[in-house]
């Protein structure tokens, strides 16, 4: 009868959201892991894909979602 003393958190890691630095659940219950939400997940992917990953004055960027690798 010691099941109430179980440690459910042991199987649920928590990590800091790479986008907003908030602690969030890192498990199957969080489909946006390691992010805290769909918003942060989308923001981070967008930043890496288009903005933060390259210099802003690199190109005038006619194509909004052009892949740098494909452009060269
Ligand atoms: Zn977040």
Image (tube, rainbow, N blue to C red):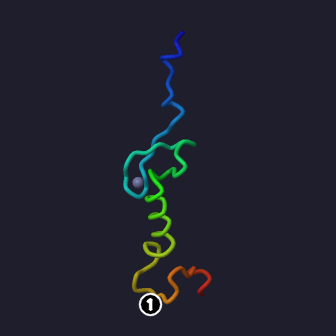
Query: In terms of image quadrants, where is residue 39?
Result: bottom left
Going by the picture, which residue comes out furthest to the top? Answer: 1
Label 1 belongs to which residue? 60
Which residue is pictured at 57% across the width and 79% down the height? Answer: 67
Which residue is pictured at 48% across the width and 31% down the height? Answer: 9
The image shows a total of numbered marks equal to 1
Q: Work out whether 13 lies above or below 34.
A: above
Quarter placement of the C terminus:
bottom right
Q: Work out whether 29 lies above or below 52.
A: above
Residue 14 versus residue 3: which sits nearer the camera?
Answer: 3
Which residue is pictured at 45% across the width and 53% down the height? Answer: 37
- Ligand 1 picture quarter: bottom left
Which residue is pictured at 39% across the width and 45% down the height? Answer: 23
Q: Is mark 1 within 8 Å of ligand 1?
A: no
Q: Badge 1 local density, few (<14 within 10 Å), some, or many (20+)?
A: few
Q: Position of residue 1 (x, y in %)?
A: 54, 9
Q: Position of residue 56 (x, y in %)?
A: 40, 82
Going by the picture, which residue comes out furthest to the right? Answer: 70
Going by the picture, which residue comes out furthest to the front? Answer: 38
User: Is 16 on the left or on the right of 31, as rendered?
Assistant: left
Residue 54 versus residue 23: which sits nearer the camera?
Answer: 23
Q: Helix or strand or loop: what does disc 1 sit on?
A: loop
Q: Where is residue 14 in the image (x, y as percent from the top left)?
A: 46, 41
Residue 41 versus residue 17: which sits nearer the camera?
Answer: 41
Q: Position of residue 60 (x, y in %)?
A: 44, 90
């Amino acid at each position: 009868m010691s099941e109430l003393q179980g440690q459910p958190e042991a199987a649920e890691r928590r990590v800091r959201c790479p986008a907003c630095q908030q602690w969030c659940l890192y498990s199957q219950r969080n489909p946006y892991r390691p992010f805290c939400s769909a918003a942060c997940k989308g923001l981070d992917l967008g930043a890496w894909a288009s903005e933060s990953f390259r210099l802003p004055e690199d190109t005038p960027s006619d194509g909004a979602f052009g892949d740098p690798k494909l452009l060269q």
